[in-house]
Image: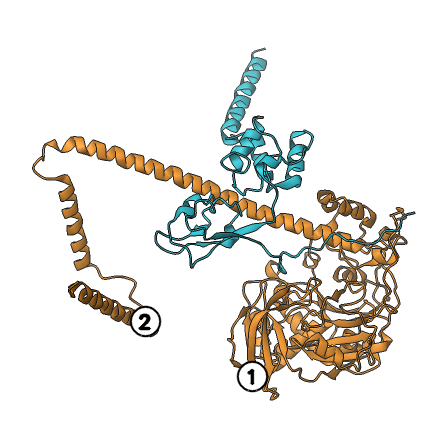
Chain colours: A orange, B cyan
Amino acid sequence: MRTLYQFHGGVHPAEHKQESSAHPIVMAPLPTQLIVPLQQHIGQRAKPLVQIGDRVLKGQMIGQADGATSCAVHAPTSGSVSAIEMMPMPHPSSLPDLCISITPDGADEWITRTALDYQNMNPGEVRNRLRDFGLAGLGGAVFPSHVKLNPGKLDKVPTLILNGAECEPWITCDDLLMRERAAEIIAGAKIMQYLLSADAVLIGIEDNKPQAIAAMRAACAATGFEVIAVPTRYPSGGAKQLTKILTGKEPPSGGRSTDIGVQIFNVATAYSVARAVLHGEPMISRIVTVTGNVEQPRNYEVLLGTPVKELVALTGKQRNDTQSYIMGGPMMGFALPTDNVPVIKASNCLIASSPSLFPAPPPALPCIRCTQCAQACPVNLQPQDLYWFSRGREFGKAQEYNLFDCIECGCCDYVCPSHIPLVQYYRFAKSEIWAREREKQQADLARERHEFRLARIEREKKERADKLAAKTQGSKAPAANADIDPKKAAIQAAIERAKLKRSGVTPKNVENLSVETLKEIDEIEARRTQLKQAMEKQSDSPK
Amino acid sequence: MSTALLIMIGLALFLGLVLGYAAIKFKVAESPLVQKIDAILPQTQCGQCGFPGCKPYATAIASGEADINQCPPGGEEGIHKLAELLGVDPKPLNAEHGVPKPKSVAVIDEELCIGCTLCIQACPVDAILGAAKHMHTVIAKECTGCELCIPPCPVDCIQMQVVQEDLTTWKSKYPLHEIRNV
């Protein structure tokens, strides 16, 4: 029996899991249109690889990873590319970003899929393939997985943790995935273990999911992996919290879990790794819980890019009192400003929200410094102080009080007897600090360029002055060679030099050119001679 | 007696060498105060303060020739930071020097541009690309929005465009919620 540790604080809100967990996962039908954003992960947006009108196959890469922290995106089904344009994103602002729209042809025709013989491949090569398979964390942060699967300088990460805690109320997608597809999750964990050279694989699942725990234990038989039931307490599924529960270790403030020899992945990410490596299927779908104020809450396997509107329509007739859809859970999610946005890699849950399910919070009262928030904070912060600093725009102070260790879990909001929207203040403060950071970078760039410009102007001035000085010096000297005009001599010398150059040297930039470029050059040459002839004709013709 | 004297002389020589070396090695070319002030200024290089750039303004503030409320792009926040640094009371922005505007970048109407290079010469951060009799264009990423390129343009083909928010620059807004008075 493993000793479990406790993280500080936490809350236990009503679970609301049984609504959607009673039914098996069903495959959502093909939507009429798929909108695939090129930025579904943290990091650089993928580069589009297709053009409007192209036919794409299911699983074909349509966006290529751009930079180290980025991953590919793929066509979720076969069809034709109908648009590449800015479309509203599932984001609190619903601001647009570049998306590729695909009109499905109904054939659902796959690319040729080949499994990877990963054990006989260089780990770096496997990671590159995972990047090209579009693997990103499905727990919510969507960090590109190939980056996390690189032990880097450490050679190995001793402990691999699979996160099946799923602590947020309402969400059951990981629960159902573990119940139904445990074997593949474990297969994915084996691949991750191989890439990280991990010694121990721990799988943490909250004890309110007995069926998932049983299924995972059965799948883990004879693997040495350990399935651990952890007490149900929000936010035990936070990466740092689960690490603390299972190992007793905490990464330092601002540090990473690899600093203490731990790497942690969501169970759904492990499943997708197995689909990619063992079946050659890129990340084109995910399990999404659709619940809340709907006729039939349940989990769907949804193609990424499916419009939210079409997905929620599958649950039956839309109810009149549904005011919005929350993406993510009620604690950390956000209300979508429009249902005309696609499902992306981060969309684990959609909750139809109604005034009876999620009543508007009562008016806030002043903070009474009761410190209930500090008792509930799972990262041991002082939320009431952070609130004062954020409210007063004392961002430096907020940072001193470790604002950036806040995981925005919402425990402080949940317990606040004054109903102050604390997390909103922290988000405000964080984005103001990031904006100032960006402004500072821009100012530094502008300073550098301005100083360079001043230096350049100074240099040019000096060069001109030097030239002038040389000229006046030179004009005094040539009295001896009075019969030769210095200007004419200089021109003559230049002509001689040019002649010499032309005869002796061939241009160096025409070697190693591709056939297309050579053709292009020929075309340009032809155009040039034509133009020359035309001009000569024009000048010859009488005026 | 002589040992003590020798030790003292030796020590004096050694420390002198250390100090001399430090004076050369850690020489500060310009006043650190100017640098600190310059770090607060927004580096727009727009000259609205009446000085030809942020560094000259910073120098003027440091020497007491200029006031801290002459920088519109820095806004109230800049004034507060300067006041804090210099230990003086913050004061409202001097409207003579202009008003704060949202961050903008210059955009050249490439149809109208005649390629005169006048804007290129005016740009304080070399953010305009082009050559004589060739169309010019602004490198948006490097434009500080100083508006110095607008007056010299003989065909009025440069316009300022306010930078729109996108997903990477989106900011969580200050929470607006009802508060019950008690």
Up-down: is A34 above or below A529? below
The residue lying furthest to the right in this view is B182
The residue lying furthest to the front in this view is A543
Residue A111 position within the rendered picture, expressed as x and y whole percent measured from the top left = 56, 84
Residue in the picture at 61% in, 66% down:
A97
Q: Are marks 2 and 1 on the same chain?
A: yes
Residue situated in front as seen by the camera: A426 or A254? A426
Q: Is residue A197 left or right of residue B13?
A: right
Residue in the picture at 25% in, 61% down:
A507
Asked if one can make out residue A144 in the rendered structure from this viewpoint, the answer is yes
Query: Chain under label 2?
Result: A
Using the numbered discs, state the Cα–Cα distance from disc 2 to disc 1 in whole angstroms.
Answer: 35 Å
The residue lying furthest to the top in this view is B1
Q: Is residue A429 left or right of residue A501?
A: right
Residue in the picture at 68% in, 65% down:
A94
Q: How many residues crowd around disc 1 within 10 Å: few (fewer than 14), some, or many (20 or more)?
A: some
For badge 2, the amino acid type reads Glu
Residue underneath mark 1: A111
Quadrant for the C terminus of chain A in the image: bottom left
Residue A34 position within the rendered picture, expressed as x and y whole percent measured from the top left = 63, 78
For badge 1, the amino acid type reads Ile
Residue B5 position within the rendered picture, expressed as x and y whole percent measured from the top left = 56, 13
Q: Element under label 2?
A: helix
Quadrant for the N terminus of chain A in the image: bottom right
Of circles 2 and 1, which is in front? Answer: 2
Query: Chain under label 1?
Result: A
Q: Element under label 1?
A: loop
